[in-house]
Image (cartoon, helix red, strand yellow):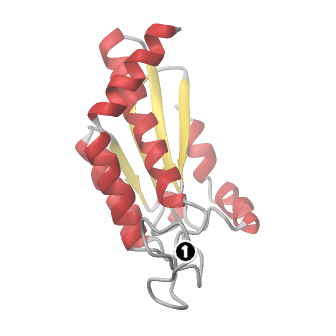
Amino acid sequence: MEAIFQFVDEVVEAQRDTCCAIADDIWDHPETRFEEFWSAQRLADALEAEGFQLTRDAGGIPNAFIASVGKGKPVIALLGEFDALAGLSQQAHCAEPTSSTPGANGHGCGHNLLGTAAFAAAVAAKHWLQQHGDSGTLRFTVVPARKAVREKPLWCAKGCLMMSMRR
């Protein structure tokens, strides 16, 4: 198990600059639910650069996508989220509540980091499967309005979550 942890640590460390740039970019472009077009494209570009194949407009939702790599089982699904909250603008690197633009959107819950961490996990898992010749399919699902609980049934109805789990 220690070898796996060391492997993941090395892959994530090698991705540090990319991950920091993604997190900072999403922070700088806070988009609220159903408006996460810039953020979705930023993650899509990064995943494509890592060799993932994209299914865009997943479930007919314009800013949803599923990025896939590998083949066979198990199917490992990760959820990328990056939605901001209205009115929570915050200056970066400031521990005290200090709005960068009063009343503007912001990442009050750190979703710019959560989506980026899921990206790092997907990249590490992809490298593990490739380096060790293991079979498996990785699916990175991005759907808008992750925070809106009432939207989860919409994702299911449109098949976004089930598409991630299918072969």
Name the residue tied to disc 1: 34
Above or below, 127 relative to 155: above
Residue found farthest to the left: 49
Q: Position of residue 111 (x, y in %)?
A: 54, 59
- 18 left or right of 71? left
Number of numbered discs: 1
- 164 left or right of 128? right
Residue nearer the viewer, 158 or 122: 122
In terms of secondary structure, where does tag 1 sit?
loop
User: What's the amino acid at mark 1?
Assistant: Phe
Q: Residue at x 55, y 37 (%)?
A: 77
Q: Quadrant of residue 65?
A: bottom left
Q: Residue at x 69, y 59 (%)?
A: 157
Above or below, 87 relative to 74: below
Within 10 Å of disc 1 (Cα), the crowding (few <14, some 14-19, many 20+) is some
Above or below, 109 relative to 99: above
